[in-house]
Image: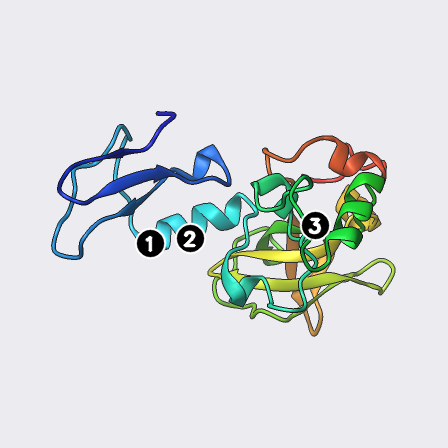
Amino acid sequence: MSSSQGSDQGWQWFKDPRLVCLGFRGIFPSNITPPLIEVDKETDEQNFLLWRIEKGVAEGSTEIPKGEAVPLEYNLAGLNAISFDKGCYVGQELIARTHHRGVIRKRIVPLRFLDNDGKELVNKVIPGSEVMNTASGKQAGTVTTALGCRGLGLLRLEEEALKGSSALSVQGQEDVKVVASRPDWWPSEWLQDHGQHAAFA
């Protein structure tokens, strides 16, 4: 479906403006459950949250810190959240300059948490944990969201660990391995400046 659907009963479905794969959002009175639209199945909030994390989409002030987050690092330019044509807004000049130069050194990426045998670890990592490059001993980034064995992390794109040549782990928890993946909706040019076409698993 390419347009919203609604009724004279006061409910409305809208396509999520960020990504097609995020489906639709509904607005309707609390005492009404509108019929589903043309989708395969209904899902619950937990499954949708996991799906959003797997797609590398941060949301809300808990995942995108107010006054601290750099919009381009949180991939907002690719999620229809930034206009480069409208009038002035706070930070516009810096954001536009960085965008057009095309050099973003860190980005939000989906993460998986595994043990040394490659098995998924559940509830072993908390937001704020530092992700380390075990080969260089340098910090590769930070876990921003953790849910079960999945999460989001703000990682440096130039890290060799993202090229599969070395491992990522959680600082202080060397038995917790971190696997980063490139979301399938990312434009290829986001990685060109770092020579990262094959950077992500």
Q: Going 85% across and 65% down the picture, which residue do you hit? A: 137
Q: Quadrant of the N terminus?
A: top left
Give the mark nearer the N terminus: 3 vs 2.
2
Q: Which color mode does the image show?
A: rainbow
Which of the two residues, 123 or 23, is positioned nearer the viewer here?
23
Local packing at callout 1 (Cα closer than 10 Å; few below 14, some 14-19, many 20+) is: few
Task: Answer above or below: position of 80 versus 29.
Answer: above
Q: Is residue 86 above or below residue 94?
A: above
Image position, residue 148 (x, y; %):
46, 60
Is disc 3 placed on a helix, strand or loop? loop
Q: Residues within 10 Å of mark 2 (few under 14, many from 20)?
A: some
Amino acid type, label 1: Glu
Are dots 3 and 1 in contact, CB under 8 Å? no
Q: Is residue 188 left or right of residue 55?
A: right
Query: Residue extending furthest front?
Result: 87
**Could you tell me if the residues under marks 1 and 2 are in contact, i.e. CB atoms within 8 Å?**
yes
Quick check: can you spot residue 198? no
Name the front one of labels 3 and 1.
Answer: 3
Q: Which residue is mark 2?
A: 49
117 and 84: which is toward the camera: 84
Which kind of residue does numbered mark 3 sit on?
A: Leu
- The residue at the far bottom in this view is 172
In the image, taking residue 20 as reference, residue 134 lies left or right, namely right
Q: Which mark is residue 72?
A: 3
Q: Which one is earlier in the sequence, the residue at label 3 or at label 1?
A: 1
Q: Is residue 54 above or below residue 40?
A: below
**Numbered disc 2: secondary structure:** helix
The numbered mark at residue 93 is none
